[in-house]
Image (cartoon, rainbow, N blue to C red):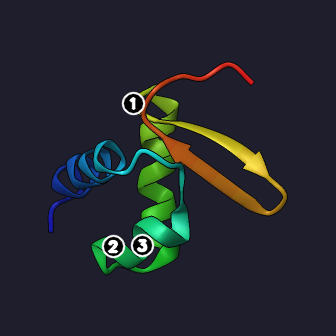
Amino acid sequence: MKPENVKKFIISILGKYPEDLTVMDISKIVKMNRSTVSKYVRELHKKDKIYQINVGNAKLCYLEKRNF
């Protein structure tokens, strides 16, 4: 799958799940290696396409900006 398609898929997955997902959750859904998914998540986060918060060792990903 092309990188742009993976990024679109990640965004669509986050849109379908109202709760936050970890990179591990996303990697299981897209059936890709966690480190590969992590790379795409970082790229999307840098472009403000998705947002993240750190909870312990986990990074929770979501689509809409939230105030915590």
Secondary structure type for disc 3: helix
Q: Nearer the viewer, mark 2 or mark 1?
A: 2
Is 5 placed left or right of 33 in the picture? left
Identify the secondary structure beneath mark 2: helix
Give amino acid for label 2: Ile
**CA distance separating discs 1 and 3:** 18 Å
The residue that label 1 is drawn on is 49
Amino acid under disc 1: Lys
Badge 1 element: loop
Q: Are marks 3 and 2 in contact (CB under 8 Å)?
A: yes
Q: Nearer the viewer, mark 3 or mark 2?
A: 2
What amino acid does circle 3 point to? Answer: Ser
Image position, residue 17 (x, y; %): 37, 51
Q: CA distance from mark 3 to mark 2?
A: 5 Å
Left or right: where 56 falls relative to 22: right
User: From this viewpoint, which residue is outermost toward the front?
Assistant: 18
Q: Residues within 10 Å of mark 1 (few under 14, many from 20)?
A: some
Decide which of tag 2 and tag 1 comes sooner along the chain: 2
Q: Which residue is mark 3?
A: 27
Residue wearing tag 2: 29
Query: Considering the image in quadrants, where does the C terminus appear?
Result: top right
Residue 47 occupies quadrant:
top left
Near mark 3 (Cα within 10 A), the count class, few <14, some 14-19 or many ≥20, is some
Q: Which mark is residue 39?
A: none
Q: Position of residue 27 (x, y in %)?
A: 42, 72
Picture layout, residue 26 above or below residue 17: below
